[in-house]
Amino acid sequence: QYPQSNTVTSCDPHLRPIMRRRARSLPSSPERRRNTATQCRAPGCSNRRNRVRFADALGLELTQVKVFQAGEDPLIPLHVLSRLSINSDLCCSRRELEFAMQCLVPDFQQPADLEDFPSRLQEQRVCLERVSSLDLGLNGTVRVVNIAFEKQVAVRYTFNHWRGQHEVSAQWHSNAPGKDGQDPVDVFTFFLPIPPFLLQVSSVVEFAVRYRVNGQEYWDNNRGENYSFTCRSHPLKMPRECEESWIHFI
C-alpha cells in the first residue's frame, strides 16, 4: 500500500491574483479629486465642469414622429420646385441644357438714379428710393421729408390691377441731413411678400407709397403711373461641362 497523503496534486497551472491596471489616460480617483480641487488662476477660467445629459435620462423621448395626412402634404414653393427641376434635367441630359427662369423685373428706372430725385423728393415730400426683387418678395427703401417726429409710411400694392389691394407698413431705418439748405429726410425700409403663384409670365405687381404726417397725406405713385414689376421669362443655356458649377450656384 502506498502511504496516503493530504496533499492533492494537479496539472492545472498555479493561479495568481489578477492585477487590474488603469489606462494611463484615465487618472485614478485620488488624482481626479486633486485635479478637481485645484483652483484655476488664469483670467477668464472657470472651475465649473460641463456635464452632458441625454433626453432619455430626463424621461424625454429621443425621437419625434410627425404623421402627415392626405390633406396635410407639405407645400413646396414654386421657386424651389423650379430648382429641383433644373437639377433633374442636369442629371439626365447629355447635351447643352436650355431652360427658362421666371423673375420679377421692374418696369421703371430706379428713382435714386434719376437726376431730378432730390427735387422730386422736396416736391412730393415722399419718394421711393430703390427696390429690388428677391426670392420671396420685393425689398425697398423710401425717403420722406422730416416734417415732424410722428409719421407713418406705408406701401399699398395689388396683384390684380387694384381689384383687390394690400398694405404693408414701412419701418424707420435712419435719417440724413438735408443738402443745399433742404429739409432733412428720414429713410424707411419695406418688404412686400410675393406669393408663389405670382411667378407666372406676364403677372404684374403694382404699388405706391403713402406718407402721413401732421394730419396730412402725401403719395408717391410714379407720377400717376404707379410702380410695377412684371414677371418675365429669361431663357438660359448651359453647357454640360458647367453642370457642377451651376449646381453649386443654385
Image (tube, rainbow, N blue to C red):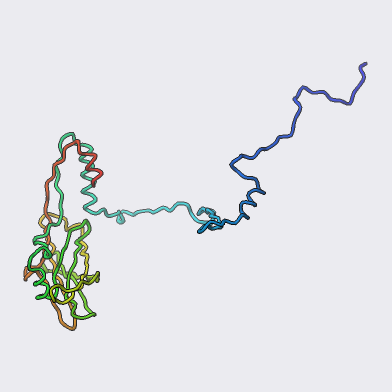
Residue 92, compared with residue 207, is above or below; it is above
Furthest residue to the bottom?
Answer: 215
- State which quadrant residue 135 falls in: bottom left
**Nearest the camera: 112 or 240?**
112
Seen in the image, is 23 located left or right of residue 17?
A: left
**Nearest the camera: 131 or 112?**
112
Question: x and y percent of residue 40 in the render?
Answer: 57, 56
Quadrant of the image for the N terminus?
top right
Question: x and y percent of residue 226 in the render?
Answer: 9, 68
Could you tell me how many numbered marks the image carries?
0
Give me the residue at 74% from left, 34% from top.
Answer: 17
- State which quadrant residue 248 falls in: top left
Give me the residue at 16% from left, 40% from top.
Answer: 238
**Nearest the camera: 204 or 141?**
141
Seen in the image, is 36 located left or right of residue 16?
A: left
- State which quadrant residue 8 falls in: top right
Residue 134, compared with residue 22, is above or below; it is below
Residue 63, compared with residue 154, is above or below; it is above
Question: x and y percent of residue 67 in the render?
Answer: 37, 53
Seen in the image, is 25 located left or right of residue 87?
A: right
Question: x and y percent of residue 224 in the render?
Answer: 6, 71
